[in-house]
């Protein structure tokens, strides 16, 4: 069956059977992109998700909206070009929107389930976006996550990272103060997790298990009773911010050294929370956990791998799947030092890259070969900036 006519001749009973095995919106769009007869079997709204409205309890009552996203590899049919995208669902139109996963900004691309753009919801409220035809491009899932938008959170209660628990029963929230809390939906108050005096830098979910890392580099997993069970020995790295990344089923810790306005700072957990502080990364060390010996190994190179430290998820990829892209580096976001409002608050983040070959940290815009990971041939660009 090499032609579209043959695909259209498949009996409806078989198409309905195939449609029952679709389990995400990306598959729905690909299914509907085949032909008119295929679109008649599965509706546009099939598996369409709705944002979850959350009302946080005291001491800081606030409303939040939760929605899920998927980090994917967008590649063409020939696999000669690929880039990273964050796939989100537009709640107003139901369309899939593709955004740069490194910088949160308005989408520049949306998906189309047909080359003729004949979907009843393709107009997207008149927005002028480039359309990615899913007959010509393929989306390959890398990692899923949730994004949260909060209203009226005070600086003393600011949340750094949130993870939705299985079956949407509650959330794990890591606060800017370094404290970790759990809130089950319907509970009257938050439940504190961890030891008094401990400060946590990152939280993640891997294979259904929740992990957290503290300021000393100790990784623990969270049991069903919301107690911490130590998983790894102390790292004792001297950086001020630690992130966890899993690559090839191995745990890595990215230890970041920070500066404020060109001056080195101590651990942020000892500083008063101040939203106007503009901390940027000036050096990065990476360590791998040797589970057999229970020790940390200093990593001097990532080889063909790339780590991406996002605000919502951290993950690893192999540049063999991204033709023309450079490996052995770490992407992350920092506040743009020259871009702040009258109160000194940072208005925009900028993408930066750490290179293992020379230890440099520069703006992604400065290196076309590194920028290619987010913009192969699709005219994508990160926010313009100078090259510090």
Image (tube, rainbow, N blue to C red):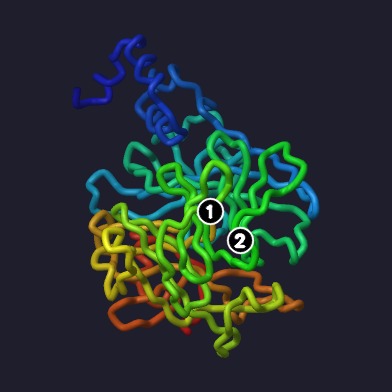
Q: Position of residue 5 (x, y in %)?
A: 27, 20
For this rendering, which residue is in front, 150 or 350? 150
For this rendering, which residue is in front, 39 or 188? 188
Q: Which image quadrant for residue 83?
A: bottom left
Q: Could you tell me how far apart the alpha carbons at marks 2 and 1 are, in whole angstroms?
A: 9 Å
Earlier-in-chain disc, 2 versus 1: 2
Q: Which image quadrant for residue 293?
A: bottom left
Residue at mark 2: 195
Q: Residue at x 51, y 25 (%)?
A: 46
- Density class for disc 2 (Cα within 10 Å; few <14, some 14-19, many ≥20) is few
Q: Position of residue 245 (x, y in %)?
A: 40, 60
Residue 349 appears in view: yes
* Secondary structure category for the residue under label 1: strand
Res. 228 mark: 1
Q: Position of residue 202 (x, y in %)?
A: 52, 61
Image marks 2 and 1: residues in contact by CB distance under 8 Å:
yes
116 left or right of 385? left
Q: Position of residue 263 (x, y in %)?
A: 57, 90
Q: Residue at x 67, y 76 (%)?
A: 340
């Amino acid at each position: 069956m090499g032609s579209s006519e043959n695909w259209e001749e498949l009996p409806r009973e078989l198409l309905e059977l195939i449609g029952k095995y679709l389990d995400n919106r990306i598959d729905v769009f690909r299914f509907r992109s085949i032909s008119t007869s295929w679109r008649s079997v599965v509706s546009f709204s099939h598996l369409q998700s709705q944002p979850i409205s959350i009302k946080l309890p005291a001491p800081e009552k606030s409303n939040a909206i939760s929605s899920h996203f998927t980090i994917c590899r967008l590649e063409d049919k020939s696999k000669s070009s690929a880039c990273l995208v964050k796939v989100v669902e537009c709640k107003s139109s139901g369309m899939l929107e593709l955004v740069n996963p490194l910088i949160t900004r308005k989408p520049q691309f949306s998906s189309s389930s047909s080359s003729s753009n004949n979907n009843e919801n393709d107009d997207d409220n008149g927005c002028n976006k480039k359309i990615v035809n899913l007959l010509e491009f393929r989306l390959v899932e890398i990692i899923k996550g949730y994004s949260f938008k909060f209203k009226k959170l005070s600086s003393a209660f600011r949340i750094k990272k949130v993870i939705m628990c299985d079956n949407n029963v509650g959330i794990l929230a890591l606060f800017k103060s370094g404290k970790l809390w759990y809130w089950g939906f319907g509970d009257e108050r938050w439940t504190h997790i961890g030891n008094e005096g401990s400060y946590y830098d990152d939280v993640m979910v891997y294979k259904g298990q929740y992990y957290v890392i503290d300021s000393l580099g100790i990784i623990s997993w969270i049991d069903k009773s919301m107690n911490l069970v130590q998983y790894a020995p102390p790292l004792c790295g001297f950086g001020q911010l630690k992130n966890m990344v899993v690559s090839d089923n191995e745990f890595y810790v990215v230890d970041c050294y920070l500066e404020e306005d060109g001056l080195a700072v101590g651990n942020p957990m000892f500083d008063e929370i101040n939203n106007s502080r503009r901390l940027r990364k000036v050096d990065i060390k990476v360590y791998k956990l040797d589970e057999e010996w229970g020790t940390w190994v200093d990593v001097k190179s990532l080889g063909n791998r790339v780590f991406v430290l996002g605000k919502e998820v951290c993950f690893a990829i192999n540049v063999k799947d991204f033709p023309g892209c450079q490996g052995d580096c770490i992407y992350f976001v920092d506040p743009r030092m020259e871009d702040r409002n009258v109160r000194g608050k940072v208005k925009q983040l900028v993408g930066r890259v750490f290179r293992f070959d020379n230890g440099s940290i520069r703006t992604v815009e400065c290196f076309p070969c590194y920028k290619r990971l987010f913009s192969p041939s699709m005219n994508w660009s990160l926010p313009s900036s100078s090259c510090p």
